[in-house]
Amino acid sequence: MGRKSIARKIERGEYHVTRHAYDQMVARDIYIRQVHDAILNGRVVGKWEERGGVKLAIIGPRFNGDFLKVVVKDLEVPKVITVCYPYEEVD
């Protein structure tokens, strides 16, 4: 699958958010709509195999010009693992 497949599922509301991701969103004042937008409009900057599936690191824009980094496990029902501000250079 990949980012586009995940994005389609996110648009339909077919995803899970881990407790860790939720806690990070609250701590960083990030709203779920911003996570959706980052996944829908972002690009994959990392991809790795892990037990039970593939994880993708996606960097996408926020409403104010900042960027978010979202790590999503690519499953039948995608799982948002964590959300943060990227430390990578964003062009």
Image (tube, rainbow, N blue to C red):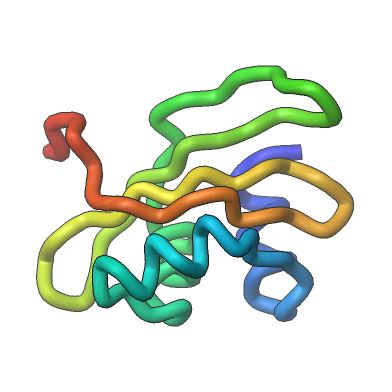
Vertical placement of residue 36 versus 31, above or below: above
Drawn side of residue 7 relative to residue 33, left or right: right
The residue depicted at 39 percent of the width and 52 percent of the height is 42
The quarter of the displayed image where residue 62 is located: bottom left
Left of 63 or right of it: where is 64? Answer: left
Quarter holding the C terminus? top left
Q: Is residue 35 above or below residue 58?
A: below
Q: Residue at x 49, y 63 (%)?
A: 40
Residue beneath the point at 55% across and 24% down: 47
Say whether residue 31 is left or right of residue 15.
left
Query: How many numbered discs, if any?
Result: 0
Q: What residue lies at 39% left-to-right and 30% top-to-bottom?
A: 45
Image coordinates of residue 58 in percent, x first then y, are 44, 43
Q: Is residue 5 left or right of residue 34?
A: right
Q: Position of residue 16 (x, y in %)?
A: 72, 66
- Residue 73: name its quadrant: top right
Q: Position of residue 84 (x, y in %)?
A: 32, 52
